[in-house]
Image (cartoon, grey):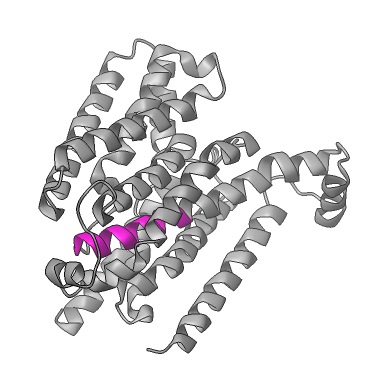
Amino acid sequence: MTRHPDRILLITLTSFLLLLFGLAVAYGETSLSFLPALKDLLAGRDTVGAVILGQLRLPRALLAVMIGGSLGLSGAVLQGYLRNPLADPGLLGVSSGAALGAVLVFYTGLAGVCTVALPLGGLIGALLAVVLLLGLAGQGGVVSLLLAGAALTSFFAAMTALTLNLVPSPYASFEIMHWLMGSLADRTMLQVWLCLPGIVLGSLLMIMSRRVLDALTLGDEVAESLGFTLRGVWGTQNRIVLGAALAIGSGVAVAGAIGFIGLVVPHLLRPLTGHRPGRLLLPSFLGGGILLLLADICARLIPTNTELHVGVLTALTGAPLFFWRVSVLRRNGS
């Protein structure tokens, strides 16, 4: 596949992303005149339309692009580095660590004291998970990394369940369960600014690994013979783990657990990129943003008594897509 199809794919995905972003900002439960509201927002006028647009819909759409994109990118990088098509951002235990940190904030009551306590708790949980992951995996390579991630995921899930078991208030349990299902509702620009640095830095660290991912398809020894450093403090493994952890942890900290995007999106786009891991990264970021934007638009527009959580919708839509992908692989004998 030449560079020309790559450009066509990127232009197509970017066009879909911009179209869905416009729909997410223009349409919602409350009808408003979009252009006057946009003019009021740009002029700094404090009208109802400007408030709905600037403080509710715009942050939500931005978070969908940022979090969905980082999940898709993380899935593509982890599947390429681990050479495991089932690798998922949740595999390293970072999502579970961020979830535990946020649950502990709920449990201690800090969530009601300070608005930034919840995302900060998630970020601290994610960073703790990274430290433990790097300490456990050491320089042991892919197998050690996978085992350490599985162990941490199980441990953090057990601690989250224990915390839920000990929560004295049924209302707190209800809040925790809703948060764990993942949602972009009622998020403001504060959450955007809180998760932006981690997602940008994490995404850059992962995109920097695109060349080594292509080399790793020929094996570790070939990659090292080409001059890539896989182990060590600044090696590829640590950069990928740190990048994925920063991006995933920042997203989970503000939106809760949103699954399946990192697993499904790279699978859908891989045939369109010639099955080269390095060329899959940017399309996966755009595809992840598209999928989460679509899920969030559906969550707002599907008529139900209570708004659906995007984490539930991504699982409901992601699972059938994955079933379809499995059937295609079976037909092709892969």
Locate the N terminus by quadrant.
bottom left
- For the point 87% across and 46% down, the residue is 40
Q: Quadrant of the C terminus?
A: bottom left
Please state which of residues 318 and 116 is positioned toward the viewer in this rendering.
Answer: 116
- Give above or below for 98 relative to 220: above
Residue drawn at the location 18% of the way across and 67% of the way down: 224
Residue 34 location, x and y as percent?
80, 54
Foreground of the two, 331 or 113: 113
Q: Position of residue 63 (x, y in %)?
A: 55, 47
Is the magenta region chiefly helix, strand or loop?
Answer: helix
x and y percent of residue 45 in the render?
Answer: 88, 40
The answer to whether residue 299 is left or right of residue 275 is right
Which of 154/212 is in front? 212
Where does the magenta region start and end? 69-83
Residue at 31% across, 76% down: 276
Task: Report whether residue 27 is seen.
Answer: no
Image coordinates for residue 254, horizontal then vertical, percent: 49, 36
Residue drawn 36% across the image and 20% down it: 104
How many labels sit on residues? 0
Q: Looking at the image, which is closer to me, 88 or 233?
A: 233
Q: Residue furthest top?
A: 168
The quarter of the picture where residue 279 lies is bottom left
Within the magenta stretch, is there residue 185? no
Residue 333 seen in this snapshot: yes
Q: Is residue 331 above or below residue 285?
A: below
Q: Is residue 93 left or right of residue 219?
A: right
47 up-or-down from 17: above or below: above
